[in-house]
Image (cartoon, grey):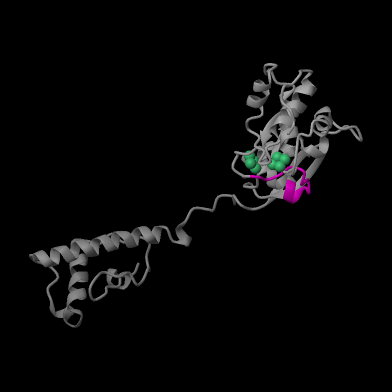
Amino acid sequence: MPTPLSTLGIGAEAPVILMTGSSHWDPTRDEVAKLIIRWRYVSEVDALPTTGTWSRREFIQAAITFAAAIAFGRAAHAAPNARAPEPPSMTAPATVTLHVNGRDLPLQLEPRVTLLDALRNYAGLTGTKKGCDHGQCGACTVHVDGRRVLSCMTFAVMQQGHDITTIEGLANGDALHPVQQAFITHDGFQCGYCTSGQIMSAAAVIKEPWGSNDSDVREAMSGNICRCGAYPGIVSAVQSVRGNNSSSTPG
Ligand code: FES
Ligand code: FES
């Protein structure tokens, strides 16, 4: 084990750790005193006493030095050689198998990838749109086990083993889903950016226990924002699939 003086280096004005020769050093009072004397009288260290009554100044210097020594010990404990084994990486890509639109899709994903990004950027299913990416606009709505879910707010890795449906999987072959057809018939969109989310939400709403009025549809669809303001057509389309008359008139 190195001696304290070879373990800890000292600067002119404040203790500065220069060497880390040992991970454990528990200095005695005399060792700290030697260190301080060495700090203050580098050229005279051998001539000076190492024990005796300390002045106030020496006491303060001892406290500073001792704190540095403790910090040094902790730093040495945290050195790579002394560290516990690294836990498994939280960012390394792993194979995540998503069951999307009736097919298994094995994807290499980092655990932090959202379902939205997995669908769009890794599976090439760009029908699902990214609007806010913060759970506020509904553009990213998909179905997970038949329930509408904001895909920007869930990690892809959490949806393994679940049945995911996107706008690309809603139609039955060449036959559009009734909600898709209703959006066309009732002019339920303008630019179309929100539309896949609106349709996925509406396709779930028609199975949910909402009231029969337009206001119920507006409430049920309130998580889906349309910047074009195509709401009258959207309400009318949803009501038509539910078998209700709507007083909403597309503009
Ligand atoms: S993109 Fe998911 S809620 Fe807006
Ligand atoms: S149709 Fe343009 S945002 Fe809804």
- The vertical placement of 14 against 111, above or below, is below
Determine the main secondary structure of the stretch shown in magenta: loop
Give ligand 2's quarter of the image: top right
What is the x, y in percent for residue 18?
34, 72
Q: Quadrant of the N terminus?
A: bottom left
Instruction: Let me know if residue 201 is in the magenta part.
Output: no
Asked whether residue 251 is in view, the answer is yes
Depth check: 117 or 247 in front? Answer: 247
Image quadrant of residue 23? bottom left
Image quadrant of residue 197? top right
Magenta residues span 120-131
Left or right of 161, for residue 91:
left
What is the x, y in percent for residue 21?
38, 68
**The residue positioned farthest toward the bottom in the image shown:** 43
Q: Quadrant of the C terminus?
A: top right
Residue at figure coordinates x 83%, y 27% from the top left:
178
Residue at figure coordinates x 36%, y 57% from the top left:
74
Residue at figure coordinates x 63%, y 39% from the top left:
137
Instruction: Let me know if residue 125 is in the magenta part.
Output: yes
Residue at figure coordinates x 55%, y 50% from the top left:
87
What is the x, y in percent for residue 168?
81, 39
Image quadrant of residue 50? bottom left
**The residue positioned farthest toward the front in the image shown:** 251
Total numbered labels: 0
Asked whether residue 144 is in view, the answer is no
- The vertical placement of 67 against 207, above or below, is below
